[in-house]
Amino acid sequence: METAEIQRRFLKFFESNGHTVVPSAPLPAFEDPNLLFVPAGMVPFVPYFLGQATPDWNRATSVQKCIRTPDIDEVGKTSRHGTFFQMNGNFSFGDYFKEQAIRFAWDLTTGSVESGGLGLDGDRIWATVYLDDDEAIDIWHRQIGLPLDRIVRRGQADNMWSMGIPGPCGPCSELYYDRGPDYGPEGGPEVDEDRYLEFWNLVFMQNIRGGGPAKEGYEVTGDLPKKNIDTGMGMERMAALLQGVDNMYETDQVRPIIDKASQLTGKRYGVSTSHTASESHPDDIRFRVIGDHVRSSLMLIGDGVVPSNEGRGYVLRRLMRRAIRAVRLLGYDKPAMPELLPVAMERMSTAYPELRTDFERISSYAYGEEEAFLQTLKHGTTILDTAVSETKSEGGRTLSGSKAFELHDTYGFPIDLTLEMAEEQGLSVDQEAFRQLMTEQRQRAKADAAARKTGHADLSAYWQILQEQGPTDWKAYETLETESR
Ligand code: ATP
Ligand code: MG
Ligand code: MG
Ligand code: MG
């Protein structure tokens, strides 16, 4: 089943159950100063959960574009983490609660394909609930008929959902699909989250959290005015399950980018025979990074983000640079974006037609960024490689902070690029010393700026005029003429 069809079925199911279809918000989280990007479908609805605004409807459904930058290092190494993905959600604002939310998710997931469902095998589904949520266990077991040994209690990190910052939160119940022994050891989601693939999270949105750590160890400080439902089904994960592929990068929206990269580089994708992403050959991981990051870059520029050295623009820059480097590590050294980006656009414009009409603007940012980066790489790579071999020949395992600083300062290498490139050659980087040098540089810049402001400038020329001409009688406040004595 193609991704577009999953989307259609999802929205239709909830629309026919009284939900209003709400379009996706753009990726940049403009409303929330604490977030760069929207990481979940509920973000545009936060004011409704908090009771700060009242929606025109008490049931909604959406397919929200999401970016999760913290997942960047997982890309390609697990089967399930993209930096960009789409979260299909159904929401209740003080309307239905636990029982109905679980029933909806179960019916759509296991409903037959002929009747508009997604057709997954209910006997392979596991559910998790928050530690003390006996009510959810009861619904899963008695009403849905899930055996107790496929219902697992888990703690705050997994089953108390929040955005990672103060705001709405709530206990949740997640649905996992057992992909079988080819994908890892048995024993449920606590043993292997790649074999048991989490595809849907049902959040019983009823509490408020305070500050503190993002995932675990924060305090639940109060209750929301109403009991709400917020769910998120990962569309790419569902697509992987329904398309019978090993991971989300091999689904119909991403795989063609990998195939194009394989054609360009002349390297085969699928070197590893294992179905488990964590056991992959490094080349396979690089292909997945390319597929994911090229698509994410397209979606970000499409939503108005442009490459820069800070904030959202830096996230985009980092994604593009990682994709471009992965292409080069696979052996292709010409500009790759003009080959890869149009493939991503072709796949994504079915759901987002504006990507096609806006493609000239989008692609000119992407191609320009690649050209600039290839220049940076050309100059910096030799310096880095020399430093790496020097360090190694002296028996060292750590690249010095001053080298990392030089690469940053003179060749425009961001530290994470140096870290990645050094790591590929088996070295770590003295980050402490690098940071120290950065701090010193900032202090020097500050001192220079302060000196300019307080006027420690060369005034000798004026002094000479004063000696020769004597002081000026300044009358500009009363008249436009000055008198010289
Ligand atoms: P995981 O534990 O696998 O990292 P999660 O618990 O962080 O996932 P949730 O915050 O519960 O994910 O998000 C709801 C749903 O969105 C998940 O069940 C999953 O289907 C999907 N999802 C979350 N993160 C990603 C991602 N990085 N890439 C693709 N889909 C994702
Ligand atoms: Mg996660
Ligand atoms: Mg999880
Ligand atoms: Mg989850």
Image (cartoon, rainbow, N blue to C red):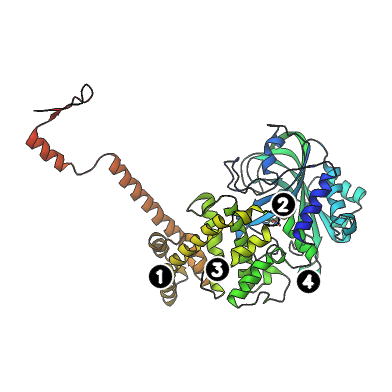
> Where does label 2 land, which residue?
87
> Mark 4 to mark 3: distance in Å?
34 Å
State left or right for residue 475 relative to residue 372.
left
Label 4 vs label 2, nearer the camera:
2
Q: Secondary structure at mark 2?
A: strand
Mark 2, ligand 1, within 8 Å: the answer is yes
> Where does label 3 land, which residue?
336
**Depicted 199 relative to depicted 282: above or below:** above
**Depicted 198 relative to depicted 482: above or below:** below
State left or right for residue 380 relative to residue 144.
left
> Where does label 1 land, which residue?
383
Q: Quadrant of the rendered structure where residue 456 is?
A: top left
Give amino acid for label 2: Met
> Mark 1 to mark 3: distance in Å?
24 Å
- On the rendered image, what quadrant is the N terminus found in? bottom right
Instruction: Compare marks 1 and 4 and give the one earlier in the sequence.
Output: 4
Label 2 vs label 3, nearer the camera:
3
Q: Residues within 10 Å of mark 4 (few under 14, many from 20)?
A: few
Instruction: Compare marks 2 and 1 and give the one earlier in the sequence.
Output: 2
The answer to which of 418 and 116 lies nearer the viewer is 116
Instruction: Compare marks 2 and 3 and give the one earlier in the sequence.
Output: 2
> Residue at the spot x=55%, y=64% of the render?
322
On residue 182, which mark appears?
4
> Residue at the spot x=55%, y=55% of the render?
361
Instruction: Compare marks 4 and 2 and give the one earlier in the sequence.
Output: 2
Q: Secondary structure at mark 3?
A: loop
Q: Where residue 390 appears, x then y in whole percent?
A: 41, 74
Give amino acid for label 3: Ala
The answer to whether residue 74 shows anywhere in this view is no
Q: Where residue 335 appears, x then y in whole percent?
A: 52, 69
Give amino acid for label 1: Ile
